[in-house]
Image (cartoon, helix red, strand yellow):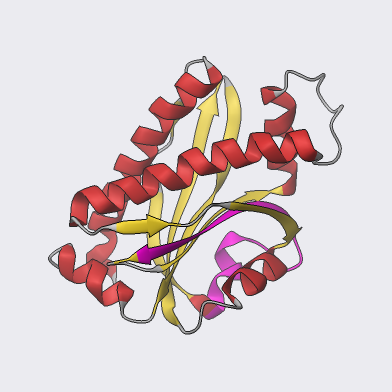
Amino acid sequence: MEQYVDALREIGNIGIGNAVTALAQFLNIKVSITVPQASFVPIEGIFDVIGDVEAPAAAVVQRVEGNLSGTMMFLFPEQNALEMVTRLLEAPPGSITEIDEMGQSVLMEVGNILTGCFLTAIGGMTRLTFIPAVPMFTFDMLGSIISSSLLCTGMVEDKVLLIETEIFAEECLVSGDFAFFFDIGSLATLLTKLGL
């Protein structure tokens, strides 16, 4: 599916660009990004790309219905999530060692901004309409996050849209993986709308 990478990268660029603006306003600091890496990854090989199945991670998970349906996830490695919460709460370095209710709220806000911007980018390029559900926060092993999030969704496509991102605010503030698990038929809808 290499012929789709340019279109996917454009979605990633637009989504990240919008996210940078929104995060800069939220954080009230200057934010910059790296060029996102976009690809389709076989669902059975996703952990070869995003990390070990037993690696602890924080995630913002959101179901999407409409012309395009599926499950969106923004996955933060545990250490990155802790550093991000520490910086956003302006706590002393190394002082936050677990994600409490306040930390969950901070990560939810960042994840909500990121997933919302990606969804807006996909909608803007395809003219597809979406009905996003309320996003949920979870902290668990990567494998558990993905399996439990997909448990009640029915059949999903065997390819996952994965966009790897790094967003900088002075030092690295947000780095993680945006993953879109498409319901059966939705991937073909996306590619058709992209003219591919």
- Above/below status of 4 relative to 98: below
Is residue 173 located in the magenta-colored stretch of the structure? no
Extreme bottom residue here? 155
- Above/below status of 158 relative to 91: below
Q: Quadrant of the C terminus?
A: bottom left
Residue interval drawn in magenta: 44-65
Quarter of the image where one finds residue 90:
top right
> Residue 184, percent across and down?
37, 81
> Residue 129, percent across and down?
26, 58
Extreme left residue here? 195
> Residue 22, percent across and down?
43, 28
Tag count: 0
Q: Quadrant of the N terminus?
A: bottom left
Instruction: Give the residue displayed 27% in from the left and 67% down from the top.
Output: 67
Left or right of residue 59, residue 168 in this image: left
Instruction: Give the residue displayed 53% in from the left and 52% down from the top.
Output: 134
109 vs 161, nearest the viewer: 109
136 vs 55, nearest the viewer: 136
Is residue 45 located in the magenta-colored stretch of the structure? yes
Instruction: Give the residue displayed 59% in from the left and 60% down from the top.
Output: 50
Instruction: Give the residue displayed 22% in from the left and 69% down from the top.
Output: 191
Quarter of the image where one finds residue 91:
top right
> Residue 122, percent across and down?
29, 53
